[in-house]
Image (spheres, rainbow, N blue to C red):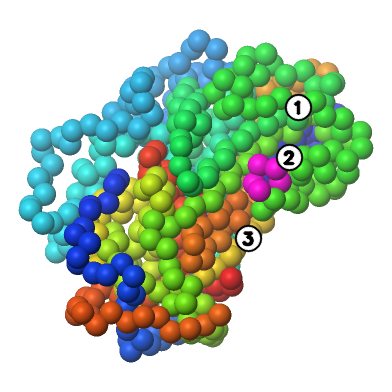
Amino acid sequence: MDLKCVLTFSCLSLLRNTQTQNIYNPNILNPDLIYFNDEGQRYPDVLPLDNRQSIWANRDANYLQGNQGVFNPVRAQTPVPTNINNFGINPNVQKPSLNSFNVIQTPSSDMEPPRRGQNFADRVADAGESDINSAIKNLTAGLVDPVSLALSDFSIKLMQSIPTQQGNLVVSPFSIATLLALLQQGSLGNTQYQITVALQLTPNQAADGFRKLTENFNKRFSSNILNVANSIFVADSFEINPSYKRIARNDFGSELIPMKFNRPAVAAQKINNWVASKTNKKIDQLLTPEAVAADTQLVLVNAVYFKGLWAVKFKPESTIPKDFYMSNGGKKTASFMRMRRFFRTDFDKTINSQVLVLPFENDLYSLVFILPSETESIASVLASLTKEQLISYQKYTPKEVAVEIPKFTVKTDTDLVSVLRNLGIVDMFGPRAQLSGIGVYREQSPQVSSAFHSAMLSIDEQGGVAAAATSFGVVALSYDDPSIIFRANRPFLTILWDKTVSIPLFMAKIENPTP
């Protein structure tokens, strides 16, 4: 028999069978007053999303040409691949420091110094597209750890690889990448090659990077909550490679929990209970009883939970019902939260979209909103978005902006098999899978038979949660109308961003906001 595995959100089962914002003078505006301008442009019906989908495996194959024969399972002491100096994730980014995860270095001398009173976006606002892209890359080169760049790039590709469909969508690229990196440590040959191309991280880089991420998460003290947990549920009959067990514990912080899978419904419920405990019960039905077979040998689980409070909270009495124009040409009434404050914001010409960054308390996290112009679709924006742009948004200069965004809660269950195949991860789903570095059952190597992902994101006046009365506002009349209005009354992208390590934790598209 073949030995198979089931990959679910945060789960892999093996079966026998198959930057700080500027401080502004408080006298600029009264923080207790909120300004709204209800007389504004009515956005026309938005063009339908197109069906373009980017498949990246072939394009990225050149990253690892000639390296297929030098990959080793479970890392051991051999660098992987051996010609690591030629393995270009980003040739402009230096290797991470041994002492810290996120490398902050002095910009290179050839970078244009900012003019007084202008930020990066101001300097390139009138430049051509090629000049803007060059400036963005210069801005991020040498300032951000290559693991951060790789995870940002993976997040964009992941969103691009999910089949285009109307409706809301939320995923945790960080959770999926964590599971793939954990799987990568026990893979070899072409299976490891495909995962490495998708992550743009070698096994050594991934293990070291996720270890530093875990250490960073664990030492934070903040009113915001970020819980990241890994666990491996193991049947007595499965022999885990001791080296893999050590890497899972030391680099990924994984628990090892004995599990009897001969009663699938009971096993699935125990795993669901573990996930619920790590996500504050926002994800409580990760596995169905059918997802666990009696001959399951191993389940790897990752759970990510975030709860944050806005640095500047919206006033509930200022939330009002307004029209939201959906991509199918219809419209609905949504509850729009409103305020006027200084936030990082600008117009990104390369994706023809307005960008707004709302910080959470302590400035460790932010929620990035990307609002395409009326002539753009979410798909076209994703097709042009780059990792350097995501990072550069945190450098925007705060400007006075009138904000109107709808409250929403979105939860999505995604079958990852086709998504991962679109990313070039193919072999692990069939008989060519090479995963014996994880362990064996009666000398059989496992393969992945299915993959699932579950995520939720919710925001209201107080802040945001990710795992997962109408009145008039007070009008401030002591200053002029703001020159910038960010009114998210049509489909938009939103990204929960970890500012400390410069990675996206969650990404979502909102086409039908529902509180």
Residue at x-position 51% and y-position 66%:
460
SS assignment at label 1: strand
Residue shown at 10% from the left, 56% from the top: 117
Residue 274's disc is 2
Where is residue 433, by image quadrant?
A: top right
Q: Give the range drawn in magenta.
A: 276-280
Q: In this view, does 408 lie to the left or right of 45?
A: right
Examine the structure image and report whether residue 132 is included in the region drawn in magenta: no
Q: In this view, does 102 lie above or below 487?
A: above
Which tag is nearer the camera, tag 3 or tag 2?
2
In the rendered structure, are the residues bearing label 1 and label 2 in contact, judged by CB atoms less than 8 Å apart? yes
User: Is residue 55 in view from this perspective?
Assistant: no
Residue carrying label 3: 411
Quarter of the image with the N terminus is top right
Find residue 324 and report its horizontal and vertical position in percent.
49, 81
Taking the view exactly as shown, the residue that stands out farthest to the top is 77
For marks 1 and 2 on the same chain, the one whose residue lies earlier in the sequence? 1
Q: Is 428 positioned to the left or the right of 357 in the image?
A: right
Relative height, residue 426 to residue 435 (above, below) = below
Name of the residue lying farthest toward the right: 263
- Could you say which disc has been placed on residue 280 in the image? none
CA gap between label 1 and label 3 equals 28 Å
At label 3, the amino acid type is Lys
Identify which amino acid the numbered label 2 is placed on. Trp
**Badge 1 amino acid:** Ile
> To which residue does mark 1 refer?
257
The picture places residue 110, in percent across and down from the top left corner, at 10, 38
Q: Are marks 1 and 3 in contact (CB under 8 Å)?
A: no
